[in-house]
Image (cartoon, rainbow, N blue to C red):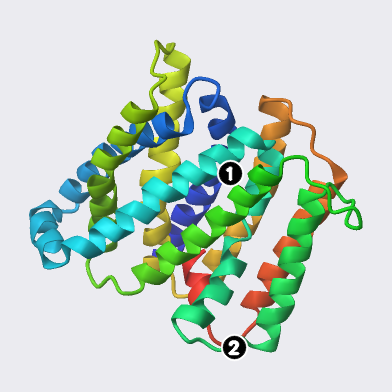
Amino acid sequence: MNERHALGYGLTAVLLWSTVATAFKITLNYFSPPQMVVIASLVSVIALLAIASYQGKLTNLLTTFYARPWYYLALGLINPLAYYLVLFKAYALLPASQAQPLNYSWAITLTLMAAIFLHQKIGRQDWIACGLGYLGVVVIATKGDLLALQFESPLGVGLALFSTLLWALYWIINTKNTADPVLGLLLGFLTSLPLSIGLSVYVGGWQTVPWQGWLAVTYVGLFEMGITFVLWLNALRLTTNTARISNLIFISPFISLLLLATIIGEQITASTIIGLLFIISGLVVQQWRSKPSPQSQLL
C-alpha cells in the first residue's frame, strides 16, 4: 500500500512540475520576475502553513527557527529569493523550451558542487554523466551549431545555468538541516518574503493585473514552490525503492515540451530534443550505481 501511495505522490508531483514552464511564460506576460517571486512566495507560505498545521507541526515552527535563525535566513536568500529571481529572468529572456532543459541539468551541477563542498568523490560514471549533460546544454544553447558557439541570448543562457548552481547550493546547505523538511521549506519562504517585497517595491512597475495573471502566479506558487515539493517528499518517504521514484522525474521535461507546444505555441526545435536526450542520458548514467546516490534522492 505504501508503494502505491508513493507512486501516486511521485507521479502527481512530476505531472505538476511538467506544467510549470508553461505557467512561468504565461505569468511573465503579467508580472516582472521580482513581482512573481513576491506573490508566488506568499501563496507558497499560505499553502505550507496549511500543510504544517494539518500535519500538527506548526507549533514547532518558532522553536525550529530560533534554534538556527541565520541558517534559515541563508536558505531563504538562496531559495526562493535568488533562485527564482534568476530562473524567472532566464525564462523572460529565453523560450521556455530552452530554459527548462537548461535548468534541468542542476542534478549534474550538484555532483560537481558536492565534490567541492561535501568532499564527495566523483567517479567515472559521474564524469560521463557530466560530459553528456553539458554537451546537451551546449546543443540546446547554440541550437545545434556547436562549432559557432553563438547564443541567441547569452544572458538568458548564463542565468539558466546560474540557476542550477543556486539550486544545487541550496540542496548542499540543506543537507545540514536536521529539522522537519516542511518546516525548513516554510521558514525559508518566511525569512525571504520581506526581502522579496522590498526588492519589488524598489524596482517598481506594479500595475493593475487581470484575473488571468493572478490565477497563473497563484498556480506557480502552489505547484512549483509549495505543494508539489511536499508531495515529492512524501513519495520518497513512503517508498522502499528511491531510484524507481526518482526515475519518474525523467518524463517531466518531455511532457513540459509537449505542453509548451500545444498551449502557448512554442516551436520545439530538433536541437532542443537532442540536447535534452543528452541531459537525460547523463542523469540515467548517474543513477546506474549499486547504492542510491544523494542526487537520486534529491531529484
Residue beneath disc 2: 290
Residue 293 in sight here: no
In which quadrant will I find the N terminus?
A: bottom left
Badge 2 element: loop
Residue at image coords 51%, 45%? 86
Badge 1 element: helix
Residue at image coords 55%, 21%? 29
Residue 162 in sight here: yes
The residue under label 2 is which amino acid type? Ser
Closer to the camera in the image, 237 or 289: 289
Q: What is the distance, in whole Å, between disc 1 and disc 2 at their CAs? A: 29 Å
Q: How many tags in the picture?
A: 2
In terms of image quadrants, where is residue 131?
A: bottom right
Q: Position of residue 68 (x, y in %)?
A: 17, 66
Numbered mark located on residue 173 in the image: none
Closer to the camera in the image, 235 or 19: 19
Q: Position of residue 214 (x, y in %)?
A: 41, 21
Closer to the camera in the image, 114 or 179: 114
The residue under label 1 is which amino acid type? Ser
Residue beneath disc 1: 18
Neighbours of disc 2 within 10 Å: few (<14), some (14-19), many (20+): few
Q: Position of residue 61 (x, y in %)?
A: 13, 55
